[in-house]
Image (cartoon, helix red, strand yellow):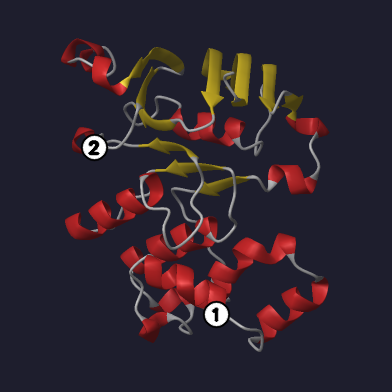
Amino acid sequence: MINIILELQDVNYEYKNHLILNKINLQIKSGDKIALLGKSGAGKTTLISILNGTINPTKGKAKFYNKEFDKLNYDQKRKISTIWQDLRLIEDLSAEQNVNCGILGKESFLFALKNLLNISSFKKAHKYMQICDLKKSIYSKNIRKISGGEKQRVAIARSLIQESEILLADEPFNNLDPKLISNIKNLLLISKNKIRVPNTTVISLHRLDLLDGFNRIIGMKNGEIFFDLEKNKLKNSHLNKIY
């Protein structure tokens, strides 16, 4: 039996009378490793925002485990984690505090207070930071004082520590050098030995050389899905339709 996690049914999204997404029908199944392709402005970021419930469709339905987003409770929504292209880190906090923010929804108010006062245990946060190739020297640094690549990996660690069922990521390899890209991509798609990694992922990309490890490729253009294929069926003729 196919286990459908996320589903969009005839979804449109309009902003200021401009149609951003048009008639999107999509089913995401457990175990999918999806690469989302398309030029800037194709609608990839908006699609991710619909998939995690950040914005609501203008028309159509978005469902998580067959339940519409406006009927989900907080615990259910936390089963979806997101790595945003703009990272959305909290600049007044340290790197380790930002990572810890990924688990605040599972903890008590007292834990949240201790986290902000910097007196709680960061053992788990440090584990995820280490796996994301972050050095100990930046753990307690204010987020403003670390590099762009380090911020990128803090955002990734914050998302992974949430231990969600599905991970959505919008250009998560920005600001990373080739070695780090390989390490982080393997972490998100393959490695499950040291930490719990979501079984299902949707990652938007602009680099075609990063498609190894994905089993499904979705191509977007002008707010529409032009193709949705198994990785081994992708051809240059498909890519020519969207680039």
Residue 147 seen in render? yes
Give the residue drawn at x 52%, y 29%. 47
Residue at figure coordinates x 33%, y 33% from the top left = 214
Residue highlighted by disc 2? 207
Instruction: Point out the frontmost of discs 1 and 2.
Output: 1
Q: Which residue is mark 1?
A: 123
Amino acid at the residue labelled 1: Lys
The image shows residue 15, relative to residue 80, as above or below, that is: above
Lateral position of residue 119 relative to residue 129, left or right: right
State left or right for residue 95 relative to residue 238.
right
Pointer 2 local density, CA inside 10 Å: few below 14, some 14–19, many at least 20: few
Q: Which of the image's four quarters has the N terminus?
A: top right
Question: Which residue appears farthest toward the bottom when viewing the image?
Answer: 119
Cα separation, mark 1 vs mark 2, equals 35 Å
Towards the viewer: 51 or 76: 76
The correct choice, above or below, for 240 with respect to 143 in the image is: above
N-terminal-most mark, 1 or 2: 1
Rendering quarter of residue 39 = top left
- Residue 232: x and y, percent? 25, 20
What percent of the width, then of the height, locates residue 145? 40, 79
Q: What amino acid is labelled 2 in the image?
A: Arg
- The numbered mark at residue 33 is none
- Quarter of the image with the C terminus in it: top left
Image-based side of 49 in relation to 104, left or right:
left
